[in-house]
Amino acid sequence: MGEVVSRVSEIDGKAVVPGDAVCVIEEFMPGAWTYVANGVIRAAVAGRVQVDIVTRTVSVKPFVKLFEIPVRGHYVYGYVVMVRDEFAIVKITGSAHHVRYAGTFTGLLHISQSSDRFIKNLYDVLRVGDIVKAKVLNDATPYNLTLKEPKLGVVMAFCGMCGSKLMKQSSDTLKCPSCGNVEKRKVSIDYGNLKGL
Ligand SMILES: [Zn+2]
């Protein structure tokens, strides 16, 4: 037991870079952000070693909070700040994976990524002020976005006539419960459900 405690104090909190040997598998179980090669537990990311004595698990706590920026494949939420004929600018504010981003990021939606259907006019897809759920296509800013999945598209929008929250009418129309105004959008099947936002 004394041997384990001294071993823990030796490696717990130690700074490591990817590939560094942390310990051998006879000592501890491999935990998060580690991998095992030839019986040696190694760090998969740069961070600090954390030992859980109860579960006898060793893990690495990354220095940088991973995924604090959008990466390819992430489903994100954002609000539309500009719409032109061919593209729209979306401020990405959060992820749909319960990951908190470090700030807001600029997303670019090209008309060719706005729908599976033929779209003549991007104003039929989204408008300034709408909240959209989109998928990130690349790993650098500006992030290219797509809305080409049923769960992607506008998840919240407000009436252009009176400002009320619009209700879903069909996959491409929203209706105002207050004034009856009908507006076109690419409506997400998750419209009104802002989980993870
Ligand atoms: Zn209205």
Image (cartoon, grey):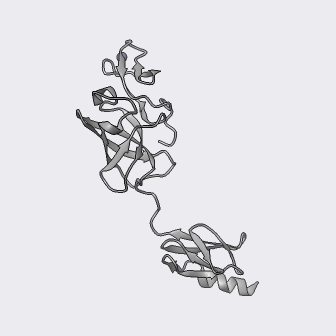
Image vertical order of residue 108 relative to residue 165, above or below: below
Ligand 1 visible in quadrant? top left
Corner quadrant of residue 7: bottom right
Of residues 128 and 10, the one nearer the viewer is 128
Give the residue drawn at x 72%, y 69%.
55
Of residues 86 and 54, the one nearer the viewer is 86
Q: Quadrant of the N terminus?
A: bottom right
Q: Position of residue 196 (x, y in %)?
A: 50, 43
Corner quadrant of residue 86: top left
In this image, 9 relative to 61: left or right?
right
Q: How many marks?
A: 0
Q: Which residue extends farthest front?
A: 118
Q: Which residue extends farthest right?
A: 1
Q: Position of residue 6 (x, y in %)?
A: 67, 86
Image vertical order of residue 193 relative to residue 42, above or below: above
Corner quadrant of residue 8: bottom right
Give the residue drawn at x 29%, y 32%.
128
Image vertical order of residue 131 relative to residue 37, above or below: above
